[in-house]
Amino acid sequence: MDKIKKYQDIIIDFLNRYNSVKTSRLNDTIKRRVLVDREHNSFQLLSTGWRGNDYIFGTIFHFDIIDGKIWMQCNNTEYEVVHEFMAAGVDRNDIVLGFVPPQARHFSGFAVA
């Protein structure tokens, strides 16, 4: 299997499984949506809707595949996604923590770019 396709499938599977877990913060007016753009290698899980008079819109996860590596652009949870990706066959050298400043990425134990 092509590496990019494999990484796309791993990300999409993760997002769909995470999305299927119900939390107390969700209700009939707040929904989570998985957004998949295989052509541009961009993947997100969003939360949208209304809580009373407050409009809720936020990114839970955002991943891109850039130059054959998974870039974690956003993780607004305490969930350790990288461990799940590595268990699914992603090499730690193919994971970039995009939200970490470039000059500090070498401390992360993952790819710097």
Image (spheres, rainbow, N blue to C red):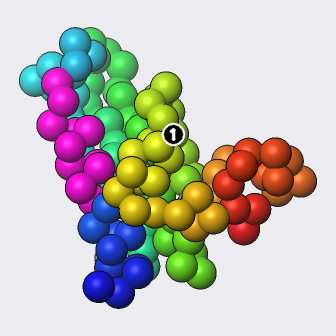
Is 104 a magenta residue? no
Dominant SS type (magenta):
helix
Image position of 71 with respect to 99: above or below: below
Question: Which region is colored magenta?
Answer: 11-22
Q: Residue at x 20, y 43 (%)?
A: 17
Label 1: state its secondary structure: strand
Measured from the top left, where is residue 92 in percent x and y?
Answer: 58, 58
Q: Pointer 1: what residue? A: 75
Tell me which residue sits at (22%, 19%) in the image. 23
Quadrant that contains the N terminus? bottom left
Q: Is residue 105 left or right of residue 60?
A: right
**Residue type at the position of mark 1:** Asn
For this orientation, the residue located farthest to the right is 103
Q: Is 31 placed left or right of 44 in the picture?
A: left
Rendered-image quadrant of the C terminus: bottom right
The residue positioned 57% from the left and 53% from the top of the image is 73
Residue 72 lies, in percent from the top left, at 55, 53
Asked which quadrant contains residue 110, the reply is bottom right
Quadrant in the picture for residue 37:
bottom left
Q: Residue at x 40, y 81 (%)?
A: 3
- In this orientation, does residue 98 appear? no
